[in-house]
Amino acid sequence: MDGKTKLELQKTACKIRMGIIHGVHAAKSGHPGGSLSVADILTYLYFKEMNIDPADPKNPNRDRFVLSKGHAAPALYATLAERGYFDKQELFSLRHIGSFLQGHPDMKNTPGVDMSTGSLGQGISAAVGMALSAKHFGDSYRVFAALGDGEIEEGQVWEAAMFAANKKLNNLIVFVDLNGLQIDGTIEEVNSARPVDKKFEAFGWNTAEIDGNDFEQIEKALAAAKASDKPFAIIANTIKGKGVSFMENSVGWHGKAPDDEQYAQAIAELETALAAL
């Protein structure tokens, strides 16, 4: 990756993180921690990797993305807004009555959302179905999905993984956002799925384990995924709350909004980071 591309991605990710904070603060509720951790992955997919067009969000040939960890909707919304699917001012309407930005993704009312998600474990099944459809009809689009490390404690995830491998869905690429924290504590305290890569491999997938907040590593893993003859899982080690000092690696920020003082600090930190790029 050349330096100019990396810099632009870093700037975009910083703006997306600001969008996350704007939305969650305006809603006075939401999930900032896991939204911030997955922001770099979404930035790379929507600004570098995926075949998409904000002017034609329902194009049948587009690549699909499923946010299986649907509570991280603020990250998806901020990404879609930054990419031009809708006005960024809409982020301030998150979770408000009458807004098309609900607490979890809604494919019927939100431009750019390919699947309604929120019930953990179900999104990957939808992604598998999309990938199977592409294979069945000879379509060229690819399907991407992002899962949480707490989410993969759900049994349905592994049923979907088994099915995807049996159907040889090498057009399916899954990111596991491995930030180590879920709503009730660390994944080790609750019900750890480690080693995650070995589990996917046992179900018949190819895998890569990376720093999910590093664009060069994301790019390298995606290159391997595109050359794979099997479905591909990218185990992305990330920092929950990435980019906001007092939210980083803090389970308390899984599902609460910053107050006015915390909001001002978070935005100031992100604006400083953006100016430094």
Image (spheres, rainbow, N blue to C red):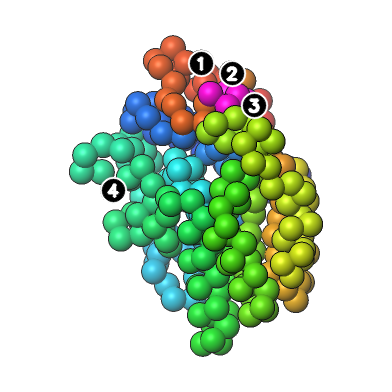
> How dense is the environment of label 4, judged by Cα within 10 Å: few (below 14), some, or many (20 and up)?
some
Q: Position of residue 91 (x, y in %)?
A: 36, 38
Q: Position of residue 246 (x, y in %)?
A: 59, 18
User: Disc number at residue 100?
Assistant: 4
Q: Secondary structure at mark 1?
A: helix
Q: State which region is magenta.
A: 247-252
Residue 164 sits in quarter: bottom right
| Distance from Cα at disc 2 to Cα at disc 3 | 8 Å
User: Disc number at residue 210?
Assistant: none
Asked if the residue under mark 1 is in contact with the one under mark 2, i.e. CB atoms within 8 Å, the reply is yes
Judge whether 260 appears above or below 193 on screen: above
Q: Position of residue 19 (x, y in %)?
A: 45, 35
Q: Residue at x 54, y 60 (%)?
A: 156
N-term mark: 4 or 3: 4
Judge whether 267 appears above or below 277 on screen: above
Q: Position of residue 134 (x, y in %)?
A: 53, 80
Does residue 209 belong to the magenta stretch?
no
Camera-side mark, 2 or 3: 3
N-term mark: 1 or 3: 3
Q: Is 227 on the left-hand or right-hand side of 128?
A: right
Whether residue 57 is visible to the viewer of this picture, yes or no, is: yes
Which residue does the numbered mark 3 point to in the structure image?
A: 249
N-term mark: 2 or 4: 4
Q: Residue at x 36, y 42 (%)?
A: 103
